[in-house]
């Protein structure tokens, strides 16, 4: 076996083991069941949720969005250079500012955002019973606070956790495949190890946050384990694809499709992060500054890891 191939297989196993192990910790431990927690235990779990929200926020901005913008911009530059080369005598093609100045990357990410928005709207339009839990909470809110409308307390936001968590898993799955693909395509042992360590550094925290999120929304342990196994397999799948095509041409349409999918995944991830995870973690007014610090710490860690990833 070639040394480079052996290193990549080792990276594949490490990505699988770390993602699955960290993701199963909150699922398999009863300590993370927030419904049964009280007092200080419940507060600690809430702060852990805030820290995981910061990790998701950092992953969305510092990794997924950054990589999507970089990839789309790179593909546009390649197209522009190729277009200039093929049309040197045509002045109308020599001026390609219309291609380079328009924010295509931001447009693709926004399309991903609106795609999830559309899916949720269609689900609620076709299946009104999906809001049954929210209606129940609203009735409880009215019953408990029916005599206190003079206060400035806000009504709790409707929750569509299961659907948004599924979208979160799909977005992370896309991203994980591309992370593994990048590791599999590295030409040297040093580059492979460096990139794999950068991926591993944030992979564990993200997987732990996903597992904690699955527990918080009340996912059955069997389905939660299956979800984490599917997510854990995505990076090894991408790495395997990288090994399969390492001898071929990784450019052309493949690079453009990868960049576009990364952009859509980034948009869906940001939608779930801002409209599901952060609002729910910050809805409770207890200890707002401590929660802010936990969210900021999670984001800061992901921003630090972005120096290498």
Image: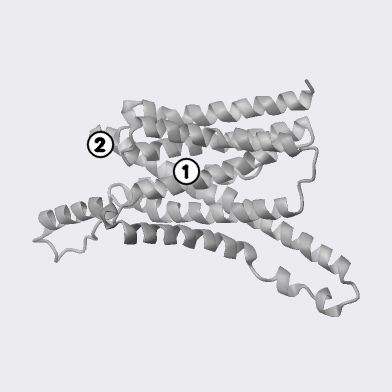
Give above or below for 186 relative to 3: below
Horizontal side, residue 250 vs residue 12: left or right: right
Density class for disc 1 (Cα within 10 Å; few <14, some 14-19, many ≥20) is some
Quarter where residue 260 is shown? bottom right
Residue 51 in percent (x, y) is at 43, 42
For mark 2, what is the residue? 35
Q: Residue at x 79, y 23 (%)?
A: 2
Q: Secondary structure at mark 1?
A: helix
Horizontal side, residue 157 vs residue 266: left or right: left
Q: Residue at x 48, y 36 (%)?
A: 207
Horizontal side, residue 202 vs residue 211: left or right: right
Quarter where residue 17 is shown? top right
Quarter in which the C terminus is drawn: top right
Residue 137 in percent (x, y) is at 20, 52
Residue 31 visible in the picture: yes
Density class for disc 2 (Cα within 10 Å; few <14, some 14-19, many ≥20) is few
Residue 28 in percent (x, y) is at 37, 26
Give above or below for 281 relative to 147: above
Q: Residue at x 64, y 33 (%)?
A: 197
Residue 195 visible in the picture: no
For mark 1, what is the residue? 169
Q: Nearer the viewer, residue 131 or 280?
A: 131
């Amino acid at each position: 076996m070639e040394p480079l191939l052996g290193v990549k297989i080792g990276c594949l196993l490490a990505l699988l083991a770390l993602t699955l192990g960290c993701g199963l910790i909150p699922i398999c431990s009863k300590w993370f069941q927030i419904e049964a927690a009280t007092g200080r235990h419940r507060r600690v779990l809430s702060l852990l949720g805030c820290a995981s929200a910061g990790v998701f926020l950092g992953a969305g901005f510092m990794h997924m969005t950054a990589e999507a913008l970089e990839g789309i911009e790179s593909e546009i530059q390649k197209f522009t250079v190729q277009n200039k080369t093929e049309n040197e005598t045509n002045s109308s093609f020599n001026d390609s500012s219309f291609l380079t100045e328009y924010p295509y990357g931001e447009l693709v990410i926004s399309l991903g955002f609106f795609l999830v928005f559309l899916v949720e709207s269609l689900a609620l339009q076709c299946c009104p019973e999906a809001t049954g839990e929210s209606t129940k909470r609203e009735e409880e809110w009215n019953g408990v606070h029916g005599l206190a409308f003079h206060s400035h307390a806000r009504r709790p936001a409707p929750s569509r956790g299961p659907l948004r968590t599924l979208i979160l898993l799909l977005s992370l799955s896309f991203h994980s495949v591309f992370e593994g693909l990048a590791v599999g395509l590295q030409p040297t042992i040093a580059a492979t190890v460096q990139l794999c360590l950068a991926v591993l550094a944030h992979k564990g925290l993200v997987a732990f946050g996903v597992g904690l999120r699955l527990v918080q929304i009340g996912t059955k342990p069997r389905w939660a384990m299956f979800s984490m196994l599917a997510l854990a397999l995505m990076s090894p799948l991408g790495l395997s694809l990288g090994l399969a095509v390492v001898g071929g041409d990784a450019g052309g349409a493949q690079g453009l499709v990868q960049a576009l999918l990364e952009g859509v995944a980034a948009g869906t991830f940001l939608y779930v992060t801002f409209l599901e995870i952060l609002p729910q973690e910050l809805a409770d007014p207890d200890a707002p500054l401590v929660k802010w610090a936990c969210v900021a710490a999670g984001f800061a860690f992901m921003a630090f890891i972005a120096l290498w990833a």
